Image (tube, helix red, strand yellow):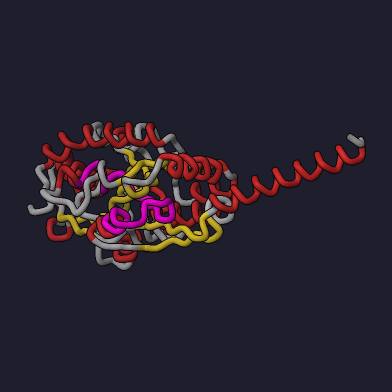
């Protein structure tokens, strides 16, 4: 064969191969994807979903939107995901509580936390905190002092949380039990609405993710009293943990996970997982999440399934100890 002709032929085959590869990529690229967030805009769940959406757009799908499907402490969003198309076009960022704690507190849920959802990846990890607002005197700076104030102001002894039966709810219950004080629980549709009432003086305290409080600390109307990690949060290094303040059993943390409908094929799950890992490694995503007190931390689907089982088993005895059910 003429060398010139062979070169042209090889060039044509290479071009065709590149074209085929480009077509394959175009076929795997979704036109549109939606990320559900079960809590109000501005909170940690919402921020995590939006940071991921920004990075998944153009790599996983041409357009990625976030929908805040609030209500029933995150159950509305999960119920919507359960019946969504199992083609990778709909996913959710959800706190562990809705899948690992709710089965222990609700006699009947509108979804099966294992059968109805396919794990994709952990997204972030974080600690809880209890914060106080203008209702509580500025002289109250520690957890023991807060307990003392609640005992002296029984009518005002209450705390808000993002949802009944959530991790922050149980943190408040465990804190009250450990301090020997009665505290009324006030559930909200997310931590930010609770903090709004905290700052407005309608509520003395709120339990929620550490990062939910960070944007409000500078003004002085919100003070974090304690955090729930093994060690002090790197986002609030001057705030001692509950354990440091004598509440040794109040060591709790949580994570947000990414899930898709249960019948989603594994090739789609794995492709989404790869896109999520790339997104979570992006410096702007890491920094953006850190601004809300969230540690970007991915996983494999198998690791997420094991993490959920671990926390499901861990929370069962805690819920039983507290004696809370959704019907109580």
In the image: residue 244, left or right of residue 271: left
Judge from the rendering whether residue 121 lies leftward or rightward of residue 102; answer left or right.
right
Residue numbers of the magenta segment: 79-102
Let me know if residue 317 appears in the view.
yes
Residue 244 in which image quadrant: top left
Q: Which residue is drawn at the image coordinates 20% and 59% (left, top)?
A: 186
Occupied quadrant, residue 175: top left
Q: Name the residue: 33% across, 43% down.
A: 226
Image location of residue 23, percent across then percent down? 62, 51
In-front residue for pair 78/298: 78
Q: Looking at the image, which residue is at 18% across and 46% down? A: 173
- The image shows residue 193 at horizontal and vertical percentages of 32, 64
> Is 10 rendered above or below residue 107?
above
In this picture, residue 75 sits left or right of residue 13: left
| Residue 68 in picture, x, y percent from top left | 37, 63
Q: In which quarter of the image is the N terminus?
A: top right
- Eyeballing the image, is 114 above or below 44? above
94, 139: nearer the viewer: 94
Q: Which of 178 and 148 is in front in this view?
A: 178
Q: Is residue 162 visible?
A: no
Count numbered badges in the picture.
Answer: 0
Reply yes or no: does residue 151 show up in magenta: no
Queried whether the magenta region covers residue 98, the answer comes back as yes
Which residue is outermost to the front? Answer: 1
In the figure, 48 relative to 236: above or below? Answer: below
Name the spot of residue 5 as percent of width and height, x first: 89, 41
163 versus 278 height, above or below: below
Task: Looking at the picture, tell me which residue is in the foreground, 217 or 77.
Answer: 77
Q: Which residue is drawn at 37% across and 57% down?
A: 37
């Amino acid at each position: 064969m003429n060398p010139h002709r062979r070169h042209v032929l090889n060039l044509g085959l290479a071009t065709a191969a590149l074209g085929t590869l480009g077509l394959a990529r175009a076929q795997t690229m979704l036109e549109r994807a939606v990320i559900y967030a079960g809590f109000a805009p501005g909170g940690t769940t919402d921020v995590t979903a939006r940071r991921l959406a920004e990075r998944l757009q153009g790599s996983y799908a041409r357009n990625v939107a976030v929908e805040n499907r609030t209500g029933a402490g995150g159950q509305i969003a999960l119920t919507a995901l359960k019946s969504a198309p199992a083609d990778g076009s709909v996913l959710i960022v959800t706190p562990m509580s809705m899948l690992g704690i709710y089965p222990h507190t609700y006699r009947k849920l509108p979804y099966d936390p294992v059968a109805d959802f396919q794990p994709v990846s952990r997204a972030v990890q974080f600690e809880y905190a209890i914060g106080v607002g203008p209702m509580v005197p500025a002289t109250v700076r520690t957890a023991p002092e807060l307990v003392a104030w609640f005992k002296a102001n029984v009518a005002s002894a209450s705390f808000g949380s993002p949802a009944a039966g959530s991790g922050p709810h149980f943190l408040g219950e465990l804190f009250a039990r450990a301090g020997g004080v009665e505290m009324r629980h006030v559930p909200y549709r997310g931590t930010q609405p609770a903090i709004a009432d905290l700052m407005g003086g309608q509520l003395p305290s709120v339990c929620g993710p550490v990062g939910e409080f960070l944007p409000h600390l500078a003004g002085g109307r919100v003070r974090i009293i304690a955090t729930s990690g093994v060690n002090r949060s790197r986002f609030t290094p001057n705030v001692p943990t509950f354990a440091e303040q004598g509440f040794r059993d109040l060591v709790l943390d949580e994570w947000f996970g990414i899930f898709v409908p249960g019948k989603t094929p594994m090739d789609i799950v794995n492709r989404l997982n790869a896109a999520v890992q790339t997104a979570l490694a992006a410096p702007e995503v890491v920094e953006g999440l850190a601004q809300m007190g969230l540690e970007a931390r991915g996983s494999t689907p198998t690791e997420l399934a094991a993490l959920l089982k671990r926390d499901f088993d861990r929370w069962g005895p805690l819920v039983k100890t507290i004696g809370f059910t959704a019907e109580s």
